Amino acid sequence: MSNNFFIERLRQRFSEQRYITREELYSFYRSFEPDLKEATFTWRIYSLKEKNILKPVRTGMYILSTKPSFSPDVEPRLIEIAGKVKKQFPRVKFCLWNTRWFNDWMIHQPGKFLIMVEVELLSAESVFYYLKDENYLNVFYNPDDKFLDRYVYEEQESIIVKQLITKAPLKKIKGIAYPTPEKLLVDIFVERKLFAPYQGTELIQIFNTVYKQYTLNITKMLAYAKRRTKEQELIEFITNNTQLTELLSE
């Protein structure tokens, strides 16, 4: 039986369910293939996720995807910086993003932006000096609160080089790593001063808009928040302020 056959039957079987457990999926496939091996089943789950048909929302729980995958508008400047860093530091893990991405999820539109270049700890400072040597302007390395007020947010656009948290949720687009929505939400929640324009009611607006537009993996989000020592605070914020509390209750 073809993959298209299974996908069509999958949609028919679970179209009325909000969530699908791993056990239900296994039972579904075994109704057609009683001798289905666990390894084969695991590969099928992976394949469905890669095709954006199945989306994980927490460990062992999925939904049939009706929302698009997060695909940020990666402007040429980001691609240029990524290309240079990748060429100069081919073995270094890093990711890039721009706070402009939040504008689509906000009510009020900030006029000043940050290009974030997050690099694994041992190489972050070297990448900072390299970008300075390449004559990029307004490049800052782990700016403290005074620097943020006096210099960073005085410019229309600044480049921030900082440590990449290990096991941060990332995705690759054309070989370059960018944050997933789960990482973006946790970062602006945790680093209130660095991302000052995105706090208060705008933070709630961003969380709710992202939740409406994309499928979020709450397990992935909380695991990353835990690595940032803010898991419980994030749970309280989600529960008291946002629509994401639906994910916590399942």
Image (tube, rainbow, N blue to C red):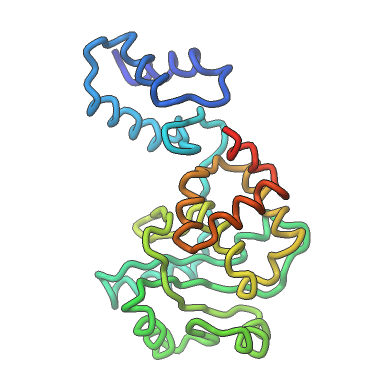
Quarter assignment of residue 60:
top left
How far across and how far down the image is residue 124, in percent? 38, 79
Residue at 52%, 52% (x, y): give it: 182
Report the front residue among 172 and 201.
201
How far across and how far down the image is residue 85, in percent? 35, 75
Residue at 31%, 13% (x, y): give it: 30
How far across and how far down the image is residue 19, in percent? 53, 26
How far across and how far down the image is residue 51, in percent? 40, 34
Q: Is residue 92 above or below residue 68?
A: below
Q: Is residue 88 left or right of residue 140?
A: left
Q: Quadrant of the C terminus?
A: top right
Q: Is residue 132 left or right of residue 215?
A: left
Q: Is residue 98 above or below residue 139?
A: above
Q: Quadrant of the N terminus?
A: top left
Report the front residue among 171 and 244.
244
Q: Is residue 27 above or below residue 215?
A: above
Quarter assignment of residue 108:
bottom right
Q: Is residue 31 left or right of residue 148?
A: left
Residue at 42%, 73% (x, y): give it: 163
Residue at 61%, 74% (x, y): give it: 194
Q: How many marks?
A: 0
Q: Is residue 7 left or right of residue 213?
A: left
